[in-house]
Amino acid sequence: MARQERRPGISGGDEYQGHDLRVREMGISVYLENRSKFPQEELQQYTGKWIAFSSDGRQIVASATDLAQLEDNLIGAGLDPEHVVFELVPNPDMITGGAELS
């Protein structure tokens, strides 16, 4: 499978800006309502990793240790990175900085 061109902001050097657009397209209130109900116990298994939520916030569709790998995992699963919401699950022992976004 040929690798798709990376979009700036997902795994390039630019700051990621696309997830807010996806959330607005499907209705931020639906996403936020479903995301707030997502079980914290399930999130704990992704501590320190990037995850991709479905656009409705009901399920995690992929995970990885960095954004580039997350994008690859999504594409490999036949999912469009433009139609998910990215989130870093915080690790209480880690201080997150800008390097994690590139």
Image: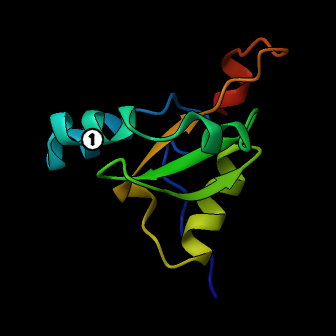
Residue at 71%, 28% (x, y): give it.
100
Image point 53% across, 45% down: which residue? 10
When asked about the image quadrant of residue 38, the answer is top left
- Image location (x, y in percent) of residue 34: 31, 42
Q: Which residue is mark 1?
A: 31
Image position, residue 33 (x, y; %): 26, 35
Q: Residues within 10 Å of mark 1 (few under 14, many from 20)?
A: many
Residue 1 on image: x %, y %: 64, 88
Q: Position of residue 59 (x, y in %)?
A: 45, 55
Relative to 92, does residue 101 appear above or below in the rendering? below
Colouring scheme applied when the structure was drawn: rainbow
Residue at 65 percent of width and 66 percent of height = 73
Residue nearest the viewer, comparing 34 with 14 = 34
38 vs 58: above or below: above
The one of 68 and 6 positioned closer to us in this rendering: 68
Asked if 41 appears above or below 72 in the picture, the reply is: above
